[in-house]
Amino acid sequence: MLRTTWLTPWDLSVALSWRYLGSVKEDNNDADPTLHFATYGAYDFAHAQIPSFSYLDLAASWTVNKHLELRGGINNVLDKDPPLASVEIVSGGAANTYSTYDALGRQLFLAFTAKF
């Protein structure tokens, strides 16, 4: 993950985050002899790899005064769909249900902090 933040002179900060997920290969196709062909007895072309993935997130925070701060942002700005994989690639469940990828797509958030 890479995050950069711009602190403006107006008590506003804007942050851009890049979340990078490297590619994932199926254990069955690994050269390690303890994994190699362990499941199917041969190379599995259908489920060979999930490619690398990137998400961009944008967030802002504004200190209105000493009592109020507003925050908001967008996760997965480009609304990128998660990769599709069959149940066979992961024992115990579908790979598409794990929280590694943004299954819900673009998400907006808004919050505030009030101090009394």
Image (cartoon, rainbow, N blue to C red):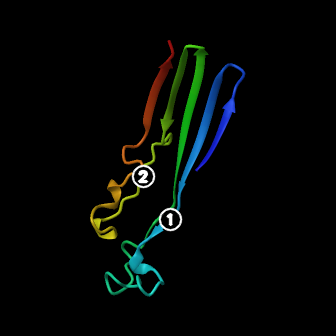
Image coordinates for residue 114, horizontal then vertical, percent: 49, 16
Image coordinates for residue 66, horizontal then vertical, percent: 60, 14
Image coordinates for residue 18, horizontal then vertical, percent: 58, 47
Compared with 39, 110 (above or below) is: above
Give the residue at x 62% y 31%: 14
Q: Amino acid at mark 1?
A: Ser
Compared with 16, 50 (above or below) is: below
Q: For residue 72, which numbered disc appears in the image?
A: none
Give the structural element (helix, strand or loop) at label 2.
Answer: loop
Res. 89 image quadrant: bottom left
Give the residue at x 37% y 79%: 44
Image coordinates for residue 105, horizontal then vertical, percent: 40, 43
Distance in Å between CA atoms under marks 1 and 2: 12 Å
| Location of mark 1 (residue) | 23
Left-right relation of 63 to 85: right
| Location of mark 2 (residue) | 101
Extreme-front residue of the structure: 116
Give the residue at x 28% y 65%: 87
Give the residue at x 48% y 84%: 31
Say which of 93 and 65 sits in front.
Answer: 65
Q: Amino acid at mark 2?
A: Tyr
Answer with mark 1 or mark 2, whichever residue precedes in sequence: 1
Compared with 6, 36 (above or below) is: below
Compared with 27, 96 (above or below) is: above
